[in-house]
Amino acid sequence: MLNLFYAAHTCALASHIALEDAGASYTTTRISFSGNDQRKPDYLAINPKGRVPALVTDRGVLTETPAMLAFIAQSFPRARLAPFDDAFAFAQVQAFNSYLCSTVHVSHAHRMRGYRWVDAGNAEAIAAMQRQVPQSVYEGFALIEQGMLAGPWVMGETYTICDPYLFTLAQWLEADGVDIARLPRVIDHRRRMGERPAVQRALAAELARAG
C-alpha cells in the first residue's frame, strides 16, 4: 500500500488530494516540523533530502511533487488525471507543474527558509529576501493568471494533476503578502477546488491529525 509522508500546510497537500482524486488505497504519516522530524534518522532513511512529501511505494520511495503527481496519475489511469494519450498535452502538464515546483514554490520559500540560500546568521540578507516575497510570488502567479490558467481548470475543461498543485500553492498567497484582488482567476480556481469532495477530505484529514 502507498504511504504518504507529509507535514500540514505544505506542498504535500497536492499529492494528498491527488490520491483522493484517484480513489487510491493509501496511508499517511505526519511529519512534525516543530519536532524537527524531517531531520531525524528514521525519516532521513526514507528521504535523505529531509523534506516532504515522500511517497513510499512497493517499488521504492518517490520524492518531488511533480514526479509523485505523475506517478499517481499513471498508477490510476481510470481517474483520468493526466492526458497520457497525448504526448504534447502531457508535456504541458509536466511543464506547468515544473514551473510551480522550480519557480513559484521557491519564491514562497524565501519567506520562511532564507537560510537555504544565505548564512542563517545573515539577518539582513534574510530580511531582504522576505521583503521581496510579495512581489516575486505575485509575479509567478501573474503569469499563471494571464496565460497559463486555461480555465475552468489549468488545462482547460479537463481536471488534471495540475489543479491540486496550483490550489496548494495558492493557499499561501495571503500569508506571502500578495494582493489576491489582482489574481481573480487564480482565486476563482482556488474557490472551485475547495468545493471538491476530494479536496475537502484531504484537508480534513490533515487538519485532524495536526490538531
Image (cartoon, rainbow, N blue to C red):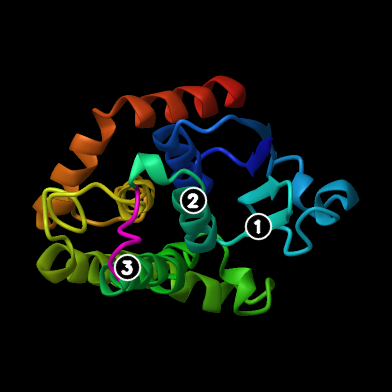
The kind of secondary structure element at disc 3 is helix
Q: Tell me where residue 129 appears, x and y as whole percent.
A: 45, 74
Position in image of residue 55 (x %, y %): 65, 48
Check disc 2: other Cα within 10 Å, few if <14, some if 14-19, many if 20+: many
Q: In terms of image quadrants, where is residue 87?
A: bottom left
Whether pointer 3 and pointer 2 mark residues with C-beta atoms closer than 8 Å, the reply is no
Name the N-terminal-most of marks 2 and 1: 2
- Whichever of labels 1 and 3 marks the residue nearer the N terminus, that label is 1
Amino acid found under the numbered disc labelled 1: Leu
Q: Which residue is mark 2?
A: 11
Task: Check disc 2 and report its element: helix, strand or loop.
Answer: loop
Q: Give the mark count.
A: 3
Q: Residue at x 32, y 65 (%)?
A: 93
Label 1: how many residues lie within 10 Å, few (<14), some (14-19) or many (20+)? some
What segment is highlighted magenta in the picture?
81-86
Q: CA distance from mark 2 to mark 1?
A: 14 Å
Q: What residue appears at the point 77 percent right and 44 percent down from the top-left corner?
A: 37
Q: Which quarter of the rendered picture does the N terminus lie within?
A: top right
Q: Is residue 144 above or below residue 158?
A: below
- In percent of width and height, residue 35 lies at 76, 40
Per the rendering, the mark at residue 96 is: 3
Quarter holding the C terminus is top right
Most common secondary structure along the magenta stretch: loop
Residue at image mark 1: 62
- Residue extending farthest to the right is 41
Question: Which of these two is toward me, 195 or 95?
Answer: 95
